[in-house]
Amino acid sequence: MKGIIGAIAGDVIGSAYEFNPTRDYTFELFTPKSTFTDDTVLTMANAIWLLEDEKHRPETLVKIMLDLCRRYPDRGYGGRFAQWIHKTDPQPYNSFGNGSAMRVSPIGYYAQTLDEALELARISAEVTHNHPEGVKGAQATAAAIFLVRQGENKWDLREYVEKTFDYDLSRKLDEIRPTFTFDETCQRTVPEAITCYLEGKDYEDVVRLAVALAGDADTLAAIAGSIASAVWDVSSEVSQQVISLLSEEFCTTLLRFNELVAKREQDKK
């Protein structure tokens, strides 16, 4: 299975290591602590937005995010975002946290042009993360997914991301890992997650590399996994285990979104 399951599986696999970091590549993929977190809830919010609002209005996305987050509390929402959820008139709060990038994968799969991916990622980010770095993190992730879907090779993807978003992708993971620490900013999450994809050999390898950085494990794995699953299948063993942990409505949304993407691909031909 390809698509946004890559972000969701990355989130679930990384969840057990978010506050229990590991640099051991051979970590156990699923533990009794494995669950979906805010990364998945908000990924689903973006998917529902694309499914239900053809005009892609930001106010619709806000309404969907508020509804889902209030119905799925205690999923690890960041402090300022947790406050945003419960406001009567929630406004953007100039964040550059990695929340804008962790939720954006549906856009990378939905978009039919690079410009569409960039524009929808901007809208998705700006309802909360309207700091330039927050927008950039979402756009870089969505663009990477879109380009990989189009068959872009790793060398050209690296060059595009570096030139367009001014991210340094020159460092190898072996250079990053020894001093890398927990960091929830786009600046210290998105480039590293993209590097995990660039160095990975298949979906599971990418996710293992992301978690073994010993950083914000679930979000690193969600972002890296969302790019990886544009080219590599998430194995049936992994996808079935992840789906078994989701709510019924999330399983339905996943199916509906995959059907929408397939239809758009067919219509494009």
Image: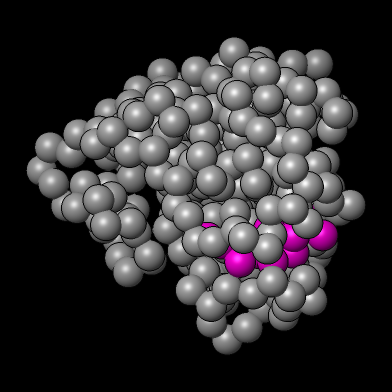
Side (left or right) of 183 relative to 93:
right
Residue 112: x and y in percent read: 66, 19
Q: Nearer the viewer, residue 11 or 266?
A: 11
Is residue 74 visible in the rendered image? The answer is yes
Residue 29: x and y in percent read: 71, 75
Vertical side of 259 occupied by 41: above or below: below
Q: Nearer the viewer, residue 164 or 112?
A: 164
Q: Nearer the viewer, residue 269 or 79?
A: 79
Q: Which residues are magenta?
A: 205-216
Side (left or right) of 233 relative to 176:
right
Residue 250: x and y in percent read: 50, 57
Is residue 8 visible in the rendered image? The answer is no
**Magenta region includes residue 154:** no
Residue 16: x and y in percent read: 56, 76
Q: Residue 191's quadrant in the figure?
A: top right
Vertical side of 193 occupied by 121: above or below: above
Q: Residue 235's quadrant in the figure?
A: bottom right
Q: How many marks?
A: 0
